[in-house]
């Protein structure tokens, strides 16, 4: 027995060890590989590779019978999609019957779809000739990823295009018209003659839904455009406006169409000056506006638009890329004041020089809209912040305090602080809570003549202290407290009761302010102070400034923010009645200290200490 015969014998023997079979698979001899494809002992991964090359060996492998016996219907999945496609084409090539257990109608439809999605050109060999229309539909259904047209241009033979375009089943023709619509939307198809022939065949279908898709095909021939332009369906005529080979007389007819939607579509896509001249005089402002947005419009045509036209049309002319400064200035000077709002649409493209030229021409409403426009140059924002109209300044204040524009840039900080002196209380109320305010600006707001501004500015500071304490952010707390505690203490004597009440009810109000309010003339404010149950962190900040962090080598802290017993003894001698009140209320205060506080000069402190001693 020679070497080749020995290899063939080993490859066909199911008892051959797997290692030897794998070694035989390295041999390039097709005869040995074909025999290996029939051996049930070969690993399944290798079998799937071999079956793609030798599909005739699949049905001769006993594994198929074993798979069907152990799990009916599993053979097709075990074979793999590529091997199934190879077997299908082999059986069709030889004229053999397809095994019904392997090739059900559902499996055939799946294989057709799979071959299309995986760019396997073998799918065009026999599937387009299948009798089942469901299989043919699967081959022309336009997928969501939009890549099906590429495989047609790469692999589909010329006769396949014509075959699907003349398919006897209406669903196949409909789906193929959708496919044709998607082919080469941006550039002509590689085989334009085949594309045109298929489009002409589809045009014989006669159904409006097919004509609608054909009308969207950019590269259909001129004779087909001529026929579709006479369709009674306005949607079909509208779609034709994008056809590359539309005869000029057809485009003129569409530009004068009775349907506004058709004329709008022509205005959007047309690049011909003669069409622009027709549409500029169109009776519909929607058509004229669409034309004014057409990027191919010349500067000369832009000049011909009437400045007395509808504001939407004039705005479109103003924003056109070819509109220069002189035209835009002319529009703002001569057009309706309603057009002035378009200034806000310029955004980053609005230059400082153009702004200064037109600022005194446009209305206050337009400047207000401009103040809120994104991308404005900083110099323009600063100029708007000094505008004489309060609504404009308010819009700037809203802009710089917006959470998307609250950067700590020095120019923004300067604007925020400057608004503290604005005569309009709405503007002061808007910026008084900004986190970028320095101590001087905060003091201005705390002394504002409007109590609502003072209260809002106060709430912002107190809210920051509460937030830092609740989130254990003690370093930011100290910074805020050291900068603004004295300002809050001044507000404890504010003539407005609501301002004082805000301090009295805040758990982190500065102790000095609460000490003042403990003697407030209003009983409900005094009672609000007496309801405090936790130590404001400000007590310890003031204490550490005076005595340090240790007393006789013992920490002054009990935890992170409350006083220890040695600190309580010193706090009991504080000049602040609120601090002494907290000491009297604390459960860790020594009884000796409580007895001293029971003789305190402040009645609230005495009463609290006596109640503690009675417990």
Image (cartoon, helix red, strand yellow):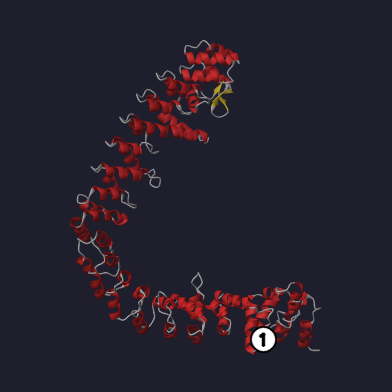
Above or below 485: residue 585: above
Residue at 46% of width from left, 21% of height from top? Answer: 527
Q: Which residue is mark 1?
A: 97
Local SS, label 1: loop
Image quarter where the C terminus lies is: top right
In the picture, measured across the screen, residue 84 lies left or right of residue 441, that is right
In the picture, measured across the screen, residue 398 lies left or right of residue 131, that is left
Res. 552 in view: no
Residue found at the far front of this picture? 232
Q: Position of residue 54 (x, y in %)?
A: 67, 83
Q: Position of residue 45 (x, y in %)?
A: 69, 73
In the picture, measured across the screen, residue 80 lies left or right of residue 307, that is right
Residue at 50% of width from left, 21% of height from top? Answer: 547
Residue at 27% of width from left, 62% of height from top? Answer: 316
Q: Disc count in the image?
A: 1
Q: Nearer the viewer, residue 224 or 90?
A: 224
Q: Nearer the viewer, residue 231 or 37?
A: 231
The picture quadrant where one finds residue 295 is bottom left
Res. 302 in view: yes
């Amino acid at each position: 027995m020679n070497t080749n015969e020995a290899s063939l014998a080993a490859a066909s023997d199911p008892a051959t060890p797997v290692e030897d079979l794998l070694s035989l698979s390295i041999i390039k001899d097709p005869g040995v590989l074909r025999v290996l494809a029939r051996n049930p002992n070969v690993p399944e991964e290798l079998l799937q590779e071999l079956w793609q090359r030798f599909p005739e060996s699949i049905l001769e492998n006993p594994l198929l019978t074993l798979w069907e016996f152990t799990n009916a219907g599993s053979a097709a999945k075990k074979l793999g999609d590529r091997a199934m496609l190879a077997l299908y084409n082999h059986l069709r090539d030889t004229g053999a019957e397809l095994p019904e257990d392997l090739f059900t109608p559902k499996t055939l439809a799946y294989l057709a779809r799979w071959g299309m999605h995986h760019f396997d050109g073998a799918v065009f060999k026999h599937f387009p000739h299948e009798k089942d229309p469901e299989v043919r539909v699967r081959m022309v259904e336009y997928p969501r990823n939009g890549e099906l047209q590429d495989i047609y241009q790469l692999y589909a033979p010329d006769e396949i295009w014509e075959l699907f375009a003349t398919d006897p089943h209406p669903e196949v023709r409909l789906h193929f018209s959708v496919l044709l619509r998607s082919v080469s939307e941006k550039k002509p198809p590689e085989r334009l003659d085949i594309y045109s022939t298929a489009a002409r065949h589809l045009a014989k279908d006669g159904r409006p839904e097919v004509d609608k898709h054909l009308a969207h095909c950019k590269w259909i021939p001129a004779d087909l455009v001529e026929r579709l332009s006479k369709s009674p369906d306005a949607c079909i005529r509208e779609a034709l406006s994008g056809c590359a080979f539309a005869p000029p007389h057809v485009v003129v007819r569409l530009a004068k169409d009775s349907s506004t939607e058709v004329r709008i579509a022509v205005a959007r896509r047309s690049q011909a000056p003669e069409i622009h001249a027709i549409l500029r005089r169109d009776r519909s402002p929607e058509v004229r506006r669409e034309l004014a947005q057409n990027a191919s419009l010349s500067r000369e045509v832009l000049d011909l638009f009437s400045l007395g036209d509808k504001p939407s049309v004039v705005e479109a002319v103003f924003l056109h890329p070819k509109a220069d400064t002189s035209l835009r200035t002319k529009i703002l000077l001569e057009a309706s004041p309603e057009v002035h709002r378009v200034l806000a649409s310029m955004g980053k493209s609005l230059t400082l020089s153009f702004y200064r030229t037109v600022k005194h021409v446009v209305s206050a409403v337009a400047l207000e809209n401009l103040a809120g426009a994104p991308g404005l140059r900083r110099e323009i924002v600063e100029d708007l912040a000094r505008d004489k109209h309060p609504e404009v300044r308010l819009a700037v204040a809203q802009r710089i305090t917006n959470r998307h524009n609250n950067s700590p840039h020095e120019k923004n900080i300067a604007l925020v602080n400057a608004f503290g002196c604005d005569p309009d209380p709405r503007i002061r109320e808007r910026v008084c809570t900004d986190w970028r305010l320095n101590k001087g600006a905060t003091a201005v707001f705390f002394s504002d003549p409007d109590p609502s501004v003072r209260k809002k500015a106060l709430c912002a500071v107190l809210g920051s202290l509460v937030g830092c304490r609740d989130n254990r952010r003690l370093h930011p707390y100290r910074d805020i407290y050291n900068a603004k505690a004295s300002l809050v203490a001044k507000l404890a004597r504010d003539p407005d009761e609501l301002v004082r009440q805000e301090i009295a009810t805040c758990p982190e109000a500065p102790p000095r302010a609460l000490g003042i309010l403990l003697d407030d003339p209003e009983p409900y404010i005094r009672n609000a102070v007496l309801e405090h149950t936790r130590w404001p962190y400000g007590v310890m900040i003031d204490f550490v400034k005076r005595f340090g962090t240790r007393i006789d080598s013992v920490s002054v802290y009990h935890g992170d923010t409350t006083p220890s017993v040695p600190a309580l003894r010193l706090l009991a001698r504080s000049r602040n009645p609120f601090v002494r009140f907290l000491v009297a209320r604390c459960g860790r205060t020594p009884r000796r200290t409580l007895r001293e506080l029971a003789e305190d000069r402040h009645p609230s402190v005495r009463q609290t200490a006596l109640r503690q001693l009675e417990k």
